[in-house]
Amino acid sequence: MNEFKIKINGNDYNVVINNVEENTIDVEVNGISYSVEMEKPLRSKKTAAKPAKPAVTRSVENTVSAPTVQVAKPSEVSGGAGGAVKSPLPGVILEVFVKVGDIVKTGQKILVLEAMKMENTINSDREGKVVEVKVQKSDSVLEGADLVIIG
């Protein structure tokens, strides 16, 4: 299993290569699995002149097109006793009600997320001090993206 951090059109992606068989590669991009078919089977490093061009043939779990707007990425580690409040679905941040250093309680409104043309209030799922606010108004976020880190 190989893990890579790549940047496409200014957006960061975590890519994990799970399996390689001849011209088919099973990859995971930001937690979503894909099967990628190469035009030609991979060659050994000794004989490879150019890498084969990848062509996504089918999605194992879901189909996602490359985003063209600023996207908040899921963080790799949520620290300590606190942790991250994550986005329950993809959408756009309409309003943020907390800032670094604020003390929040369980159930307190921390931001509003627009998803599927509906405003969703995101509440804190824990008590603690806001350590980091990972999004701002107008940011687009993916499902599972860290929104606010509470320590």
Image: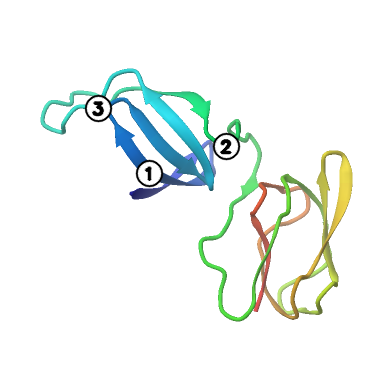
x, y percent for residue 133:
69, 66
Q: 39 and 148: which one is in front? A: 39
First reached walking from the N terminus: tag 1 or tag 3: 1
Q: Is residue 146 above or below residue 15?
A: below
First reached walking from the N terminus: tag 2 or tag 1: 1
**112 displayed left or right of 101:** right
Q: Residue shown at 52%/34% (left/top)?
A: 60
Which mark, residue 42?
3
Total marks in image: 3
Callout 2 amino acid: Glu
Q: Quadrant of residue 36?
A: top left
Which mark, residue 61?
2
The secondary element bearing badge 3 is classed as loop
x, y percent for residue 54:
39, 25
Distance from label 2 to label 3 (Cα)? 25 Å
x, y percent for residue 92:
77, 46
Callout 1 amino acid: Asn
**Residue picked out by circle 1:** 18
The colour style of the image is rainbow
Q: Quadrant of residue 151?
A: bottom right
